[in-house]
Amino acid sequence: MDFLVAHFAELLFYFLAGLTVLFALGVVLFKNPVHSALSLLATFVTVAMLFIFSHAEFLGAVQLMVYAGGIMVLFLFVIMLARTEGIQSEAAFLSNMAPAAVVGGVLLGALISAGILLGVLASGHGNPAALEMVDGARLGNTEAVSMLLYTKYLIPFEVVSVILLVAMIGAIVFGRKDRFSEVGKEEVDS
């Protein structure tokens, strides 16, 4: 019992990290796209919990609102609008790509491992108070991020929002294009 009390934070972190990895594997391994989307939602939620657990409350809230909220709605719209009747089975696509996928996976794993190793070696002892300081004034984590976001980085923030709006409108137009052409064909045939 003393071990649990002494190492509760570490055990909770590893439990959440394990859940995140399992849900991420579910995204890739489930054959049903709706099940994959639900697994992706669970991955987003557990990542948000890891952010909150690591005292990055702003990132956790943004993870929940933007990714678990907005991006998941967008993914579900794409899944519902996509027509999968004429798609060939995955065996036809994967048969020639297996060796390239293995090589790519090994290279990606080596790249991620090298990045983690270099990050651990170069990190040293950071100053966590630097995340709470803006122009010499001590603020909370959320206040510091919002102060920088809405002062120094306001223009890039707005540009990204306009780009996302244009992408969403484009996705709606491309998704509905077939319906408009089918309606036109029915009117011409009648």
Image: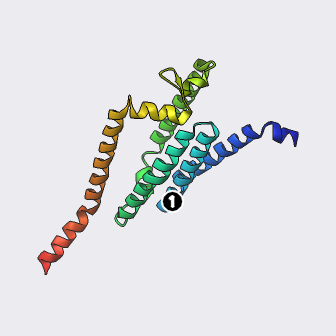
Chosen colour scheme: rainbow
Quadrant placement of the C terminus: bottom left
Percent of width and height locating residue 158: 33, 39
Image-based side of 48 in relation to 3, left or right: left
Residue pointed to by mark 1: 31
Instruction: Identify the residue at horizontal 33%, vertical 46% (top origin).
Output: 164
Quadrant placement of the N terminus: top right
Q: Quadrant of residue 163?
A: top left
SS for callout 1: loop
Instruction: Identify the residue at horizontal 54%, vertical 48% (top origin).
Output: 44
Q: Nearer the viewer, residue 29 or 184?
A: 184
Instruction: Identify the residue at horizontal 53%, vertical 40% (top origin).
Output: 58
User: What is the three-letter code of the residue carrying label 1?
Assistant: Lys
Percent of width and height locating residue 70: 43, 52
Is residue 32 at all visible to an observer of this figure?
Answer: no
Q: Nearer the viewer, residue 66 or 17?
A: 66
Is residue 178 at all visible to an observer of this figure?
Answer: yes
Q: Which class describes the residues within 10 Å of circle 1: few (<14), some (14-19), or many (20+)?
A: few
